[in-house]
Image (tube, grey):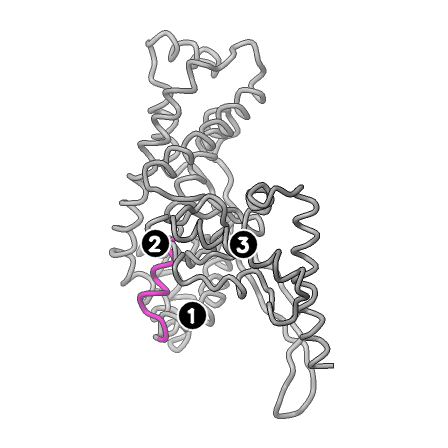
Amino acid sequence: MEFIEKIKAHQEGKYDLAANLLKLAESDMVDVQMVCTKHEVKIYDVEYEEERTEVFRRWRAKYTPNENTPEYRIGFNLKVMLSRHSKKAKNMKWALDTGSQLEKAKFDGEDFVYSVLTSLGHHYHVDDFYKIPKSVLKEVETHLNYDNWYDFKKIYSDHVNISPSVNRSIKKLHDEISSLILDSLYELLPKVDLTKTDEQIIGFISKSVRNRTYRKLTKLLGTKVHQIDGEKYIVRTDKMKMKQTIIDNMLGVNEGKLTNKQVNFYRQLKKFIQIEIDARNTSPFTFSKENEIININKRYFAEKLEMKESAFKYRLKRLQDKKDKDFFAQIG
């Protein structure tokens, strides 16, 4: 069946397109290519009292769907959602063994492993080292001398040994979001306009499923979704460190340097912020990945102070700029 025909069959209850799209997303439906880029970083050498430039190699995985069909393109978008939600479990491997050989492997060894594997035509991301077949490892052993093979095997083993515990956490997070993705698909597919083009339908399904799933997830877990510097992450409201917030530090204001008029405005603002913190109302705040408050919703607090948002932002920036000027005056 063509893509449009599958959607129509799904809408008529003759074909389960939702389940098949999720099944596709959970399969090995992508090709991976490890891409290396070089970055120059200037470093000051204390011993020789001189600045030098060092070149660091950075590897990233480039994933592409095995087929360029509507199903594969939608499945790929769903796969990205699954992967992003399980990212914190993948990061566990460094938290579980900080300061050990594993941490050293992350910073010193991955470049070596990637270089060896790609030179032999094999592309595996660090999260998938446990999937490397014995035939490939045998090929690597034959390719390297004894010392290099020992280093390779040690780095590889450090990653693989911790994979079972990480994969258990990944499965838990995967199960947490996959059912929500499926629910979203079942809700959205009946609403697809079959008169639209494939491109329009792909965009509608992918964007709508993503938005709907994240709304379901935040409601289920009691979380907030944030996006900073292009990276989307989720923090749990029950773990948000609200009581520990020092408002002066969070806003970057030194009250001791303010005029009397500025102090009145600032203290009124702090009072409203403290009320929200005491009530554990998370909606007016932005949180870091460490669950700490790092900013406020300026429109929300402007309304609390019965001010226009532009005027509120201007007055707050004046207070923050004053602290910056004092700081630069001290070091100037």
- Which residue is disc 2 drawn over? 239
- Which residue is disc 3 drawn over? 295
Amino acid at the residue labelled 2? Lys
Amino acid at the residue labelled 1? Leu
The structure residue drawn at horizontal position 28% and vertical position 61%, both measured from the top left corner, is 162
The structure residue drawn at horizontal position 33% and vertical position 9%, both measured from the top left corner, is 14
Which marked residue is nearer to the observer: mark 3 or mark 1? 3
Q: In terms of secondary structure, where does tag 3 sit? A: strand
Amino acid at the residue labelled 3? Asn
Marks 2 and 1 sit apart, C-alpha to C-alpha, by 48 Å
Which marked residue is nearer to the observer: mark 2 or mark 1? 2
The structure residue drawn at horizontal position 31% and vertical position 32%, both measured from the top left corner, is 179
The structure residue drawn at horizontal position 28% and vertical position 51%, both measured from the top left corner, is 169
Instruction: Please identify the quadrant where the C terminus is shown.
Output: bottom right
Q: Is residue 122 left or right of residue 305?
A: left
Magenta span of residues: 88-99
98 or 104: nearer the viewer = 98
The stretch drawn in magenta includes residue 44 = no
Coordinates of residue 97 in the picture (x, y in percent): 32, 69
Coordinates of residue 252 in the picture (x, y in percent): 59, 64
- Which residue is disc 1 drawn over? 144
Give the mark nearer the N terminus: 3 vs 1: 1
Residue 307 occupies which quadrant of the picture?
A: top right
**Label 1: how many residues lie within 10 Å, few (<14), some (14-19) or many (20+)?**
few
Coordinates of residue 100 in the picture (x, y in percent): 34, 75
